[in-house]
Image: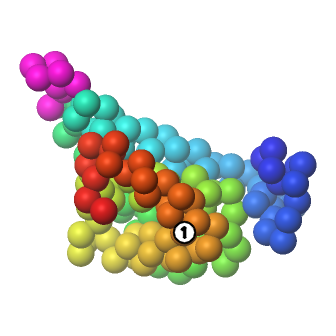
Amino acid sequence: EYLNANYPGPVELIPAEIDLARQTRLADRFYNFYVQHPMQKIVGDRLRPEGKTDPFGVEEARAQLRSAYAIIEQDMQSRSWAMGEAFTMADCAAAPALFYANKVEPFGDKYPAVRRYHDRLLQRPSVARVIEEARPYFKLFPYDNG
């Protein structure tokens, strides 16, 4: 919201229409709470010392990711972006969440619309640039696979 308010650009990250703005914020929270958070649980567990892991918590987080994927799968059947045909703040939240979630709990063939959305995000120039600039640090991610 800070960028949208202070550095307006060609992309309106938060729609001006009040209800759509609220829905955009809700979608942003969805990606943070239901994709990013369980992904971080799985990653954090990988970093724990031997004997201090939480297999139950990790399986619960994986189940949460699969539930989120199922919701996204339905939503993305008729949309290009999280809120429809316009890239918004919700997509900014979705990009890193889905990028890393796919590494810890791959989409596989069960969620083709999620995969297509993920691929569109990765092809967006701003997202591609962030990933390219982060590439030297991927080796620090415990699920690094490229």
Name the quadrant containing residue 142.
top left
125 shown above or below 71: below
Q: Is residue 38 magenta?
A: no
Res. 98 in view: no
Of residues 90 and 20, the one drawn nearer to the viewer in this rendering: 90
> Could you tell me which residue is drawn at 58 percent across and 53 percent down?
93
- Residue 119 place in picture, x, y as percent: 45, 75
Q: In this rendering, would 105 be left or right of 120? A: left
Could you say where residue 123 lies in the image, as x and y percent from the top left? 53, 77
Name the residue located 43 percent from the left edge and 57 percent from the top edge: 135
52 magenta-colored: yes
Quarter where residue 107 is shown: bottom left
Q: Residues within 10 Å of mark 1 (few under 14, many from 20)?
A: some
In the image, which residues are magenta? Answer: 48-55
Identified at 53% across, 48% down, the residue is 30
Question: Which amino acid does the dot numbered 1 rest on?
Answer: Ala
**Side of 23 where 77 appears, left or right:** left
**Residue denoted by label 1:** 128
Tell whether 9 sits left or right of 50: right
Rendered location of residue 117, percent (x, y): 47, 73
Work out whether 78 lies above or below 36: below
